[in-house]
Amino acid sequence: MIDKFTDWLRDSAKVLHENAAYLTELDSAIGDADHGANMDRGFAAVVAVLDETSFDSVDELLKKAGMTLVSKVGGASGPLYGTFFLRFGTALAGLSLTPESIGTGLRAGVDGVLARGKAELGDKTMYDAWAPALDAYDAAVAGSGDLGAALKAAAEASAKGRDATVPLEARKGRASYLGERSVGHQDPGATSTTLLLESAARTLA
Amino acid sequence: MIGIVVVSHSHALATAAVGLAAEMVAADNRPVIAVAAGLDEKTFGTDAVAVSEAIAAADSADGVLVLVDLGSAVLSAELALEFVDPEVAARARLTSAPLVEGLVAAVVTASTGASLDAVAAEAERGLLGKQEHLGSGPTPEPAAAVESGQGIEVVVSNKHGLHARPAARLVGLVNGYDARVTVTNLDTGHGPVDAGSLSMVATLNAIRGNLLRFAADGPEADEALAAINDLATENFGDDEPARFPARLGAPVEGDNGGSGLDVAFGPAVLAGDPVDISRYVAGDNESARLAAAVETVADELRRLRDASPDLGGIFEAQLALLTDPQQLKEIREVLDRGASAVNVWQLVFDRLAERFEALHDAYQRERAQDVRAVRDRVLRHLTGTTEDSPIQVETEQPAILVVPELDAATAATLDGRRFAGVAIRAAGTTGHGVIVGRSRGIPLITGIGDVAVPAGAVIAFDARKGSFEIEPDVARVRATIAEREAEQERAAAEAQLPATTIDGRTVAVLVNIGTVQDALSVRGADGSGLVRTELLFGERRTAPTVAEQVEAFRAIAAALPGKPITIRTWDVGGDKPLPFLPLDEEANPFLGERGLRAFRRRPELLRDQLEAVRQIAAEMPVHVMFPMVTTADEVAWALDELGPRPDGLKVGIMIEVPAAALRVATLTADLDFVSIGTNDLTQYVTATDRTNPAVAALADGLDPAVLQLVDHVVRNAGVPVGVCGDLASNPQAAVILAALGVHELSAIAPQVPLVKARLREADLRLIDTAAVLAARDGDQVRALL
């Protein structure tokens, strides 16, 4: 399972790198035009860690990824995604990896994001992509019990949540300074969250 | 005392804010301020791990206050609290205070030993002063007036009112007493407010002349009021600002300075080699040893500072480097873990020097020298090698000191009876040591490089010729010295005679002025061909007012009665920064926003200066010239900024850019004169950075390519042509310039009599200018003379 999580982080890094310009473009409309570059820098640093270090457990791997993002991303997504991976890893410590335990870990990570960012649903943030994704994941696990199906459902729900940020008015972060002018733009954080979940659906199952 | 952490997306922003706040309190009671800002010095961002390290570094038993800018700074700071020791986290406080105003208030309040609660409250009130002034915020609540207590009334006599620094003095003083003190501005009705709160005092808007009422109660109310009264009579600690920058040109009375010549010889005394720390044995009391050494050195520096008021600022700065509390705290922590004092001290100061050397600005880079001077002083005390300092060694005849670089303390204290001169390996002429040495008339040469000099060997140098010799022909050197002495005496005696050549041409010889002292000390100048305003006010941290500029120009003009002075507008950029005109960092500052160019985007400072020029021009003969002009558009813009010219105000430009030299005819239609800056012209024509020793030799002012441009300018300008670069200070070159038809030469003060004397002996008809212009290089030009 460690290999799959490693693949996930590497694949995410690749996808974020390919989408860096796109994310930055989204961020330039309503933020400070650095989200793509920041995520790319942070995940490239994660890959550099993976190249140098081998990990004995998934929770150690995720915690290290979280600390790396905290130090290297720079923008608000650093502490947010960093907290996500730190809490995800911490929640998995000592558990065997099942669709249920991974679901618990994801929820712990997202609770961390929520505590850190103090966002609510509809604030036009990454939480608007995370929240429906978690619900879809849990529903799929309760139904089929299959990790692959659950991750796929999560990614699809996340994409819907992402698209639904377009008409919203931002109430958090740099975009909130724009007020009404943020309406009509897709949230970059919800976009990168969806990229991470789509990558998970490809690699983790 | 609590510690303070600054978290920002930008390293530059955070360090600048810290610099601004640190200025408010003396170095020895400043709180520890740690910075966690930017992913590195250039990349915006915040790093929770770095924040947690900064919190740990600034932590103290009294707690630590964390100021943040915005966005991820807040999130990273919160996350950082999860990374530090729970005990540290419990006494760390994140504040929503505005970064800059909050930091200033926090630093001042913390320096009085106030609690974390009090400092945090002050920081959060940081915006009050501004809001009150602009009428845009909530009205501050008056403090409960001290009813039953004592009261005094004082008048604010500070020129700029109770601004931040004097207010900080007041707050610091009040918080030192066990008393509750309130203050009311009786003229504006503001108050009463808590006199122990910087933010609240700032809301008083106390300007010069306002009457303030202080009231106090509590056990030490009387003492507090008496102390406030004393402070008020001392302008709240505001020294009347020095009217002019340090007068480096003034030799100290009874000073054993140098010969004032540019040539010297004597046995070599080598100094400034790295202090030998190899035999140092660390003990179990390293912290105490270091503290003793630091205290001794601090005493030495204080003595040096007090002994030489003109140079005091240099030693004050070294003192601040020495006693930086944060640095000492960090060093002590390492020592307490068992490290050796010499190793740690050397490492820390080497790193600090490296940081200065990595700076963009040449002037700042040379401050690394001060760091090394402080480093070595302490290391010598720690290793007990003070007594063996070569500078103290007695020699039978006056010696030449050979040093890697000349520090200010050595230059200020070098005994001219025992040392005939100083040879400096490093290039660069703006180091404090070089400036001080030159002002004391000590012969010195810079940039001799790493030539091997055996200790005790007789060496000689001639700075005028740029020659440095080991085992020279002493008889010849003595002859040169005798010649220069005679030249100096004769020139001084005849300084007032006009510089009329044998063939009857009279050349005006003027003086370059960087300090008022230059104008007072010069003999025989026909006026000033260059007033370097950026030097005149270069040590100021804030821009001088129009009135202050008029006063300075008047002082210079008064020293040269009836003679014209040529005021050059701010010449900033390149290697000349002005603290009150920050410029963007540039890859090639010498090709960037220098001189006039720097004001196209921000003309305000230039406008003030031109206003001062117009005012002084109404009183006395004044010329004004603009530096670093390239195009006719720039000339038109500058003239437009100047506006209508008062009668008698002559206007010119400097010719430093080859393009301006070549098309001078198209630039001068509305001008009265041009002045060639040969230093920059040479540097641009030869594409040579003269501060780079590897290529400096190429920047020869007598290169025929430079002289051809001078010739071209003289023939095509259509207005009188002056020269104010170094070339005009060189008597030999002055003759060539005169022969080429230059009308005015502006030289440094000590050279004015020498240039005049040399011109009086010259017959310009005998100078073969055609051969000079056709020469293959500068050496061939010199050979022709």
Image: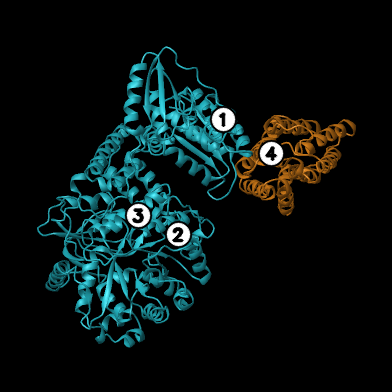
Chain colours: A orange, B cyan
Q: Residue at x 31, y 34 (%)?
A: B286
Left or right: residue A164 versus residue B287 is: right
> Mark 4 highlights which residue?
A173
Q: Are marks 4 and 1 on the same chain?
A: no
Whether residue B345 sits left or right of residue A135 in the image: it is left
Query: Which amino acid type is shown beneath numbered disc 3?
Result: Leu
Q: CA distance from mark 4 to mark 1?
A: 18 Å
Q: Which residue is mark 3?
A: B536
**Is disc 3 placed on a helix, strand or loop?**
helix
Say which of B136 and B222 sits in front: B136
Viewer-nearest residue: A56 or A204: A204
Where residue B491 appears, as percent x and y from the top left, is 17, 69
Q: Are marks 4 and 2 in contact (CB under 8 Å)?
A: no
Residue farthest along the right direction in this orientation: A143
Classify the position of the C terminus of chain B by image quarter: bottom left
Q: Residues within 10 Å of mark 1 (few under 14, many from 20)?
A: some
Inspect this view and state whether residue B730 appears: yes
Q: At which x and y percent is residue A112?
A: 70, 31
Q: Residue furthest top?
A: B148
Can residue B538 be seen?
Answer: no
Query: Closer to the N terminus: mark 1 or mark 3?
Result: 1
The quadrant of the image that shows the N terminus of chain B is top left
